[in-house]
Amino acid sequence: MNSSSLATDESVPAVGLPIFDADRATASMHVRLESVDDHFAVFTQQVQDWQRGPDGAISLAALGPMVDAAVGSAPYLSAGGTRNFVMSSLSATFVAGVGDDDTVRAQSRRVDVDRRTDTVASVAEVHGGAGLIAVVTCRAVPVERVLRETVTVPTQHGLQTVDESGTRPETRAVGAPGTANTATSLRSSVFAAVLGLEVAASTTASVSGTWTTAPWMLNPFDTVQGGVVLAVVTEAAQLALAGITSADEVIGLTEISVDLLRSPAASTTYDWSVSFLRIGRRMVTMAVTVTGTDGREQARATCTAFRVRRD
């Protein structure tokens, strides 16, 4: 969480979590560690204007880094901080609890160790003022990697206090390059621009573009955080859905399942593509891929959405 979003006299809970304290992505997204015990942690995200969707509520994509912190911290805590983990897969089921609240909350809920595969499965729930927003699951793999030094001020345990100018995601002005595709008239959201997503082409069967990563997206291992990849996939799917949504309907994204095949690097451009697998009267299914310039896939996802007529 950025220090600029806090009053100077705010009381800070004396909790700490090294794997979170060293995470630049959550710091940049204004995520705060509220409490932690031997197995579970609770996080809150102070919603910024640039994290909101057209309806004024937080964009589902903007939940990605906080979700990563919740499901990613559980295996670390369960191992007593003696092992580090990276995610191999991340899945989210969204429900109708999104409101226009200023704060959302995530809590890791359960950890199961799969001794057959030496992996860990964890679950987290995300809540807003209107109720449950999402249930998220992940499978984490232990790795022999060293955490970078914390990005917090040491006396502010568990609280992200990185320099605002150095980590805050930049948003482009309306009408700037990347906010609209002149060839297809498919307009990107503000948060899509924050993520570095640009639309290159759009047809009735697919939408594609580029994603340019940035230093604010890095995790404690100095690669792009898995929650940011989830955010990119989510935002790409919603951009594609916007192109097929008629004026008398709403299409709500309900499920996303992402295989994190590789760890994207900072300050690198990748290609993304959304292919419609089925556009039905009620259900829409899509496949999303993120690919490097070398042709290797970084992530692969399936997404489901449902169409509802406006009242």
Image (cartoon, helix red, strand yellow):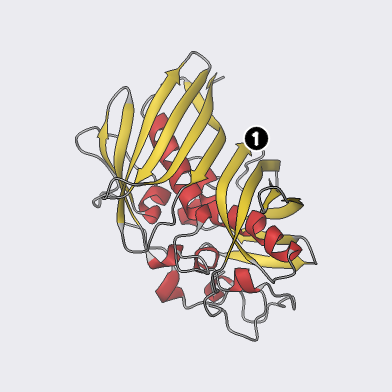
Q: Residue at x 30, y 37 (%)?
A: 208
Inspect the image, locate mark 1, and give the three-letter code of the amino acid beneath it.
Answer: Val
Q: Residue at x 65, y 45 (%)?
A: 137
- Up-down relation of residue 246 to residue 1 (above or below): above
Q: Quadrant of the C terminus?
A: top right
Q: Nearer the viewer, residue 112 or 15?
A: 112
Q: Residue furthest top?
A: 281
Q: Is residue 240 left or right of residue 19?
A: left
The answer to whether residue 173 shows anywhere in this view is no
The answer to whether residue 15 shows anywhere in this view is yes
Could you say where residue 109 lies in the image, as x and y percent from the top left? Answer: 76, 51
Q: Secondary structure at mark 1?
A: loop
Q: Is residue 169 left or right of residue 126?
A: left
- Up-down relation of residue 222 to residue 301 (above or below): below
Q: Which residue is mark 1?
A: 95
Q: Residue furthest right?
A: 38
Q: Is residue 196 left or right of residue 133?
A: left
Could you say where residue 138 lies in the image, as x and y percent from the top left? Answer: 63, 47
Q: Quadrant of the N terminus?
A: bottom right
Res. 196 image quadrant? bottom left
Q: Residue at x 59, y 55 (%)?
A: 68
Could you say where residue 301 lies in the image, as x and y percent from the top left? Answer: 47, 37
Q: Residue at x 54, y 68 (%)?
A: 23
